[in-house]
């Protein structure tokens, strides 16, 4: 049986739709007898009024829309927690939408606009185009990005300081005596990867270390490629004693390759990641990594959106959140020469690990 509408209730009660709306909004204009009549019809037909419809009838939109790239993405839960901790203290509720990279979310953005339920929109960005969001923002619906990729945009956004985070990691490794420090890049089309690489180069320069182009390799966030490239690095006579990865999953593949080559982390090769996803505290050894403040980014984005909804205007530039270096057991003082000699994996870079216990029993391997 189709769900009853206000129009249906009005017909059953023999009244106008506007009168039923006045009853739903507790208007003093409705006499008690009419109110009781409408409520009795609603009870007898198990009618539950829509919260959104009631709020819209009062002239306000009760929701904040939020688009995330997928609920299984490692940062989404932390960002959601930060957003919710702010929005739950406001008059609004959250409508959560998901949109993976395989779907063009132009149609989703259009549905959000057409529904008229959202007072503003928070978007955790990934590979989706920003044009539909910029158009929506120009049309008057406030949009704020949690800009995880650092994508250039005219929209208000909150993002981590990728450059300074990597520079801090380089300072840590230099203080441990490392001078042969390699970098395994991610997808360099992403602004965040470009910023992290710039932080790597400037970190070397600040430590008085000349950059060696042969110590920068492309991993493209693809574990088999990462393991192959790291195996090649470790086969060099002047191999690196430390490797900086552009995210934590890359760092896991780097550690896998180190162990496959018969070397140890961190005694022979120190490894640093970026992100500090939950599983990084459970690797063996636990991963030293740059922490992105995902909950704080969610809070800042939610506050910025609420301020924009209230008509506040401020600096149009992105809000950059400070990162922090989480030092664990995957980094140590640089090994002294002569270095322990690497041996190639017995069955190639895609072979199973020789000895690394990897991630904890409840965490899937990335390589």
Image (cartoon, rainbow, N blue to C red):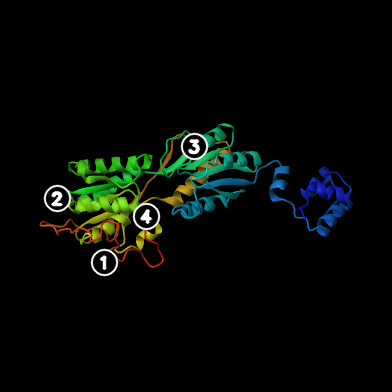
Front in this rendered view, residue 183 or 312: 183
Mark number displayed over residue 135: none
In primary-sequence order, the first of circles 1 and 2 is 2
In three-dimensional space, the C-alpha distance between marks 1 and 4, rounded to whole angstroms, equals 24 Å
In three-dimensional space, the C-alpha distance between marks 1 and 3, rounded to whole angstroms, equals 45 Å
Instruction: Please state if 26 lies on the left or on the right of 84 as rendered.
Output: right
Mark number displayed over residue 238: 2
Q: Residues within 10 Å of mark 1 (few under 14, many from 20)?
A: few
Is residue 265 visible in the rendered image? The answer is no
Question: Decide: marks 3, 2 in contact (CB < 8 A)?
Answer: no
Element on which disc 2 rests: loop
In three-dimensional space, the C-alpha distance between marks 1 and 2, rounded to whole angstroms, equals 24 Å
Instruction: Please state if 49 lies on the left or on the right of 114 as rendered.
Output: right
In three-dimensional space, the C-alpha distance between marks 3 and 2, rounded to whole angstroms, equals 44 Å
Would you name the residue on which mark 1 appears? 355
Q: Quadrant of residue 18?
A: top right
Element on which disc 3 rests: loop
Would you name the residue on which mark 4 appears? 276
In primary-sequence order, the first of circles 3 and 2 is 3
């Amino acid at each position: 049986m189709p769900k009853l509408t206000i129009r249906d209730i009005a017909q059953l009660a023999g009244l106008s739709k506007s009168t039923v709306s006045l009853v739903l909004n507790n208007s003093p204009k409705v006499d008690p007898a009419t109110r009781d009549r409408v409520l009795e019809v609603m009870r007898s037909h198990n009618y539950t009024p829509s919260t959104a419809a009631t709020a819209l009838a009062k002239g306000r939109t009760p929701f904040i829309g939020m688009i995330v790239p997928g609920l299984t993405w490692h940062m989404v839960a932390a960002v959601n927690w930060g957003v919710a901790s702010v929005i739950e203290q406001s008059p609004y509720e959250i409508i959560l939408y998901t949109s993976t990279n395989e779907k063009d979310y132009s149609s989703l953005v259009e549905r959000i606009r057409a529904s008229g339920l959202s007072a503003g929109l928070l978007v955790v960005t990934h590979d989706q185009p920003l044009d539909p969001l910029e158009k929506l923002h120009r049309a008057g619906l406030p949009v704020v990005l949690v800009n995880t990729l650092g994508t250039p945009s005219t929209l208000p956004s909150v993002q981590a300081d990728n450059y300074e985070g990597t520079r801090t990691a380089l300072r840590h490794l230099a203080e441990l005596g490392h001078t042969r420090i390699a970098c395994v890049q991610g997808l360099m089309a992403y602004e965040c990867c470009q910023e992290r690489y710039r932080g790597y180069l400037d970190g070397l320069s600040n430590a008085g270390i000349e950059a060696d182009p042969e110590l920068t390799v492309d991993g493209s966030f693809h574990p088999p490629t990462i393991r192959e490239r790291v195996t090649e690095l470790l086969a060099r006579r002047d191999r690196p004693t430390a490797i900086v990865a552009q995210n934590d999953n890359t760092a896991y593949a780097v550690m896998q390759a180190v162990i496959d080559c018969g070397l140890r982390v961190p005694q022979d090769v120190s490894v640093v990641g970026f992100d500090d996803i939950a599983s990084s505290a459970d690797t063996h050894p636990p991963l030293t990594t740059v922490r992105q403040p995902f909950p704080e980014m969610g809070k800042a984005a939610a506050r910025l959106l609420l301020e924009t909804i209230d008509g506040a205007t401020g600096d149009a530039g992105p809000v950059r959140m400070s990162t922090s270096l989480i030092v664990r057991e995957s980094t140590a003082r640089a090994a002294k020469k002569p270095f322990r000699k690497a041996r190639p994996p017995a069955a190639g870079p895609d072979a199973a690990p020789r000895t690394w216990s990897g991630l904890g029993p409840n965490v899937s391997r990335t390589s």
